[in-house]
Image (tube, rainbow, N blue to C red):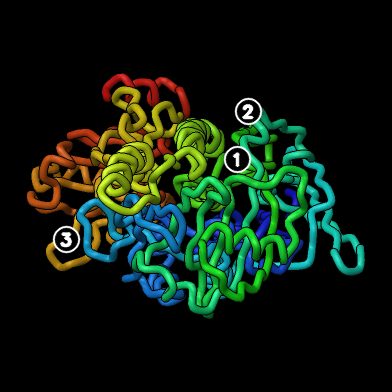
Amino acid sequence: MTTHETSVVIIGAGPSGLALANELGMRGVDCLVVERNDRVGYAPRAKTTNVRTRTHLRRWGIAGDLAAASPFGVDYPTDVAFVTKLAGPLVARIENASNCAPARDERYPEHGQWIPQYKLEQVLREHAETLPSVRLQFSTEFAGATQDADGVTVTLKRVDTGEAETLTARYLVGADGARSGVREAIGAGMSGTYGLSRNYNIVFRAPGLAEAHGHGPASMYWQLNPAMPGLVGPMDKDDIWFFMPTRLPEGVTITKDLAATMIRQATGFDLPYEVLSSDEWVASSLIADRYRDRRIFLAGDACHLHPPFGGYGMNMGLADGVDLGWKLAATVCGWGGPALLDSYEVERRPIHEAVMAEATANHAVLSNDLWRDGIEEPGEAGERLRAEVGERIVGAKQREFHTLGTVLGGCYGSSPVIVSEAAPTSPSDSRVYIPTSRPGCLAPHRWRADGSSLYDAFANKFALLCRPEAEPADVERATAQAGNVPLSVVHLTEEEAGALYPARLTLVRPDQFVAWRGDRWEDGLLDVVTGRQHETAAGESLRQDA
């Protein structure tokens, strides 16, 4: 047998790659994370860590670390205020964007959090560095790969010296972003729409800006004025803000002096703005034609790109790392079969497509589109117009900031490792999440009598949830058949089970999605949901019985 220097090489130490590393490392699987940069800088990238992502951090034991890293505290209001400019009148306000309020909620164990992506990456990286089986190598870039039936030979190059090295791994994952070298290496193409808009992220220091306006704290202020529309908001301590204009001068290079002028024009406040960074990016809606070539996989922006409206991109990429991580770990540890890795693209692609459509719809209505002449006028006429426009804004933009239906409601409808009852559909309302224990959907969350989360009892394993009337003999058969498959047995009270868990037995995967439910345990079930027995007579029988 071939001896590999590591089980998995991960190219890219962004949220997708670090999530994958933490998932593997938690399960004792050795991996190397390679990153060409040091990931340090002002660029905000994403700023919304949603409830699902923080739930994954809870599984890894670091949700509290992210809360502690919040520059403004987790109680800071994540309202979105729509104003003509910071110096102008308020037109509308949408409260508690992305469910960031820390009050306990029955639907999820962890609230969302408004925090710069670089702080999330720091928390993920610091945790990965504590895991004995995870190694991180910075200032190193991907230079190529070849593969055969036994493994992947990966060529890496030091950025500073150009020195090359090769190593062998069982699997290679490209989490290396929009310009993915791994995607190019496997010949995958991207299709969709490039160039929906040209944008700039400008990060600046503005002492006194928070006190200068009278709109109260918010995570974002959408400025609707026709001269310089865009988004502005507090980003970090020391008076650091971000500004994203949604209309740019044609054919003009954005210098620091010009950026400061644009901020003055947009906000209406003439303050001594210190521009720290500015980077151009293009909003697109693109998806790879395949996510895998045998032992090489793609995750995150390497295989899907969409406009950053709705806060989906970083969170969706991190979820890719989780999905692929536990499946690779199962394969490396010997209890996952071929269909488990086959299920990665089958499960994730429909989720990506649905979220891309949602983000693109959000991108269709920007600050530029919300202005009305006369909206800044004082007196009764101006107030009446602002009320009218405000109502229209809330109707058009609420779906962008109240997204629980999309974040928690996506289901895996046709996976080879889920014993489906009928194809679950994507949520019809992106705002409303309706929990269900239908196979393929996220297991409904419950708070238990002792104050713990039901998810905590899953222990990052397969979890067999048993109603009080479940047959003890069925539970015994399940545990006896588990073998080396990690399995927790969780006994639900009648109150905990309620109407959300109607079957006597519900089998939940390590990623907290339901794999099967039924009133009697089925022989061969674990072989199907771990990918060891796919579309065989026994597996097909299970699907027909469901």
Residue at point 53% right, 56% down? 46
Residue at point 48% right, 38% down? 369
Circle 3 packing at 10 Å, graded few (<14), some (14-19), many (20+), is some
The amino acid type, in three-letter code, at marker 1 is: Leu
User: Which numbered marker is on residue 192?
Assistant: 2
Mark 2 and mark 1 in contact (Cβ < 8 Å)? yes
Circle 2 packing at 10 Å, graded few (<14), some (14-19), many (20+), is few
User: Which numbered marker is on residue 305?
Assistant: 1
Disc nearer the start of the sequence (2/3): 2
The amino acid type, in three-letter code, at marker 2 is: Gly
Comparing 89 with 529, the one in front is 89
The amino acid type, in three-letter code, at marker 3 is: Arg
Q: Which of marks 3 and 1 is in front?
A: 1
- Where residue 449 appears, as percent x and y from the top left, is 12, 63
Could you say which quadrant of the image residue 544 lies in?
Answer: top left
Q: Mark 3 points at which residue?
A: 448
Q: Give left or right: position of 356 versus 391.
A: right
Circle 1 packing at 10 Å, graded few (<14), some (14-19), many (20+), is many
